Amino acid sequence: MEYTQLGRTGLSVSRIVLGTMNFGPRTDEADSHAIMDAALTAGVNFFDTANTYGSREDRGRTEIIIGDWFAKGGGRRDKVVLATKGFGATEPGAEGEWPNRSRLSALNIRRSVDASLRRLRTDHIDLYQFHHVDRETPWEEIWQAVDVLIQQGKILYAGSSNHAGWHIAQANETARRLGSFGLVSEQCLYNLVERRAEMEVIPAARAYGLGIIPWSPLGGGLLGGAIRRAAETGRSAEALANTAVRDRIQAYEDAVDAHGLVPGEVALAWLLARPGVTGPIVGPRTVEQLGSALKAVELELPEELLVSLDEIFPGPGETPEAFAW
């Protein structure tokens, strides 16, 4: 496994991030524990989750599964850089039925962190991420709450997820003014099919020293060999019904085949080679899927293939040129 620093911090994390969104809804607890054991054995030390992961009826279940795994001992918790998220409510219907159970008020941040700590059965969260931007809460209040939690030892770093470039700038300029450390990472939608983050989110993140953690690195399955495997179910099936999308995915699979490579591994390797990317989040449902993802770390893509990928999936270009002319 290769490691890198998380943004401008001194924290060393694996280039592959273990996503846990499937733990509970699609992967039972025993298999989830097996995947986490396999990840540690392979050197993956960066685990990502969220307070709402589980299911609509059982939000928080994923954190509980991880907490039960930590409780097995064997140095599991000490070896893991643990990232979770807060914003949404864990109680069904709480967003509309009772105030202060969601979003990023100082009150809800405190409540959410304490609840995650209980479910995760740990005394601290290494990276606490804001799952969405809160347009109603000032950053001064957010940083006040975060700084208190850092002083209490409950969290070590703060990161963002699904924030625009100007949100990142606003957050870190406010932190600078207050003497806070600010955001250290941004978790954003980024893959070969969806490259809009290159316009402003990634430039802002790099300018402020944030590590970039792409989610959905396989584009909802489109980049994992959807046509080759005839795995046209769910989001992939709907997307492939569009002729233009299907033609691009076919061209992608043909280009990958010409080099004797595996589509999913190529998609991950492409992200690993992008400037500023800490590591993509992979969400395996099985130990075998994790093993395939790990191969991407050692995969160096041929220049000819990189050129082909840019032709098939052109990026949006730099700003303001991308939208001004």
Image (cartoon, rainbow, N blue to C red):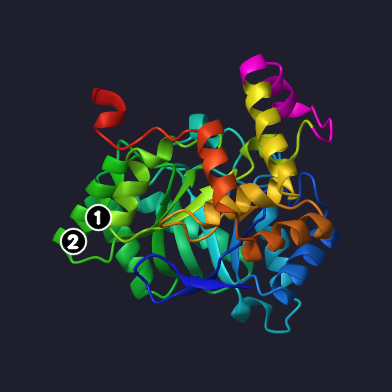
From the viewer's perspective, is residue 203 above or below residue 66? above
Q: Looking at the image, which residue is at 69% across and 43% down?
A: 256
Q: Which residue is mark 2?
A: 176
Query: Which x, y percent locates residue 161?
Result: 44, 47
CB within 8 Å, label 2 to label 1: yes
Query: Which x, y percent locates residue 148?
Result: 32, 67
Q: Secondary structure at mark 1?
A: helix
Q: Is residue 67 left or right of residue 278?
A: right
Q: Secondary structure at mark 2?
A: helix
- Quadrant occupied by the C terminus: top left
Q: Quadrant of residue 255?
A: top right
Residue 56 appears in the picture as rendered: no
Q: Is residue 112 left or right of residue 182?
A: right
Residue 233 counted in the magenta span: yes
**Spatial distance from mark 2 to mark 1, Cα to Cα?**
6 Å
Magenta residues span 228-244
From the viewer's perspective, is residue 235 above or below residue 171? above
Query: Which x, y percent locates residue 303?
Result: 54, 51
Residue 77 counted in the magenta span: no
- Residue at the left extreme of this rendering: 177
Front-most of residues 305 and 319: 305
Q: Which residue is mark 1?
A: 172
Q: Looking at the image, which residue is at 71% across and 48% down?
A: 259
- Amino acid on which the number 1 mark rests in the picture: Asn
Q: Looking at the image, which residue is at 73% across and 81% down?
A: 73
- Quadrant occupied by the N terminus: bottom right
- Amino acid on which the number 2 mark rests in the picture: Arg
Front-most of residues 107 and 76: 76
